[in-house]
Image (cartoon, helix red, strand yellow):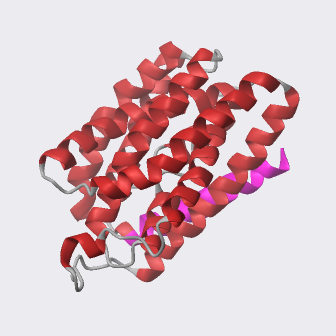
Amino acid sequence: MHELAFVFAGFFVGVIVGLTGVGGGSLMTPILIFFFGVKPYLAVGTDLLFAAFTKMGGTIKLARSKHIDWPVVLNLSAGSIPAALITLYVLHTMGAASQTVQKVMTTALGLALLLTAAATLYKVVRGKATPSSIAKGGEAAAARPRHWSLPVLFGAIIGTLVTLTSVGAGAIGVTVLMILYPLLPLPRIVAADIAYAVPLTLVAGFGHASLGSVDWPMLVSLLAGSLPGIWVGSHLMSKTPERVIRSLLSVLLAYAGLKLIAL
């Protein structure tokens, strides 16, 4: 019965991701912890690979249509991948299942969900940005950050957050990119965010797997539900009030975040 429940959970998260583009990690990890009683370290490790496999198809599609700015992806990865490896080393040294690490994980996850809720609400208030102007200097100028070091720095912060909580590469990543690359059109920001999340979640996910923090049967069930869910959600996108859904989602994420901090 549990397997079927995981399939339904995967489908539900897939539909929301397809509808809003909000990262699956910010939804799946709290669902696994609160509704299924999964230990935080197992929820995080399993969800990292869940995110990697669900975003891989999107990345291939975006790469084929040449929507991805690879220099942006490389700049972020230069910070996020080393940070993920360092965080995995710390988890290995301290023991991913230890009480102290579990408490750090749930608190960090709560804070990450609050940040995601704020980022989601920010996008609602700001509205849909038009993919207008590629400013003076053309595409190369649009793909240049405010300062070369900022993507590496913020990449490191997001890499640490994602490895600890499986949350951060979605709404938070998009918001950070909007600030760092003000001239880059929104569709290309979203494309870069999806693309850099794949190597990050793969490294962090397989790192967690090496620590025994991945439940493989649960991962298969979640993917079995999420892949058709994303397809359904993306087809319903034009028929649903996205701003209403995002607003409700931000409230739910904030509530889950506060509950996790209080654990």
Picture quadrant of residue 46: top right
Counting from the top left corner in percent of width and height, residue 90 is at 74, 31
What is the span of residues highlighted in magenta in the rendered image?
243-263
Q: Is residue 250 magenta?
A: yes
Please indicate, yes or no, whether residue 244 appears anywhere in the rendered image.
yes
Picture quadrant of residue 119: bottom right
> Residue lying furthest left in this view?
65
> Is residue 130 depicted above or below 215 in this figure?
below
For the residue pair 168 and 23, the one nearer the viewer reads as 168
Q: How many marks?
A: 0
Q: Residue at x 23, y 86 (%)?
A: 136
Q: Is residue 52 left or right of residue 104?
A: left
Q: Is residue 33 left or right of residue 133?
A: right
Q: Residue at x 48, y 67 (%)?
A: 175
Q: Is residue 255 left or right of residue 118?
A: right
For the residue pair 74 and 20, the one nearer the viewer reads as 74
> Is residue 3 depicted above or below 46 in this figure?
above
Q: Is residue 221 left or right of residue 98?
A: left
Counting from the top left corner in percent of width and height, residue 28 is at 53, 39
Q: Is residue 140 magenta?
A: no
For the residue pair 166 and 218, the one nearer the viewer reads as 166
Counting from the top left corner in percent of width and height, residue 18 is at 32, 50
The kind of secondary structure the magenta stretch mainly shows is helix
Counting from the top left corner in percent of width and height, residue 255 is at 68, 58
Please indicate, yes or no, whether residue 38 appears anywhere in the rendered image.
no
> Residue lying furthest right in this view?
100
Quadrant occupied by the C terminus: top right
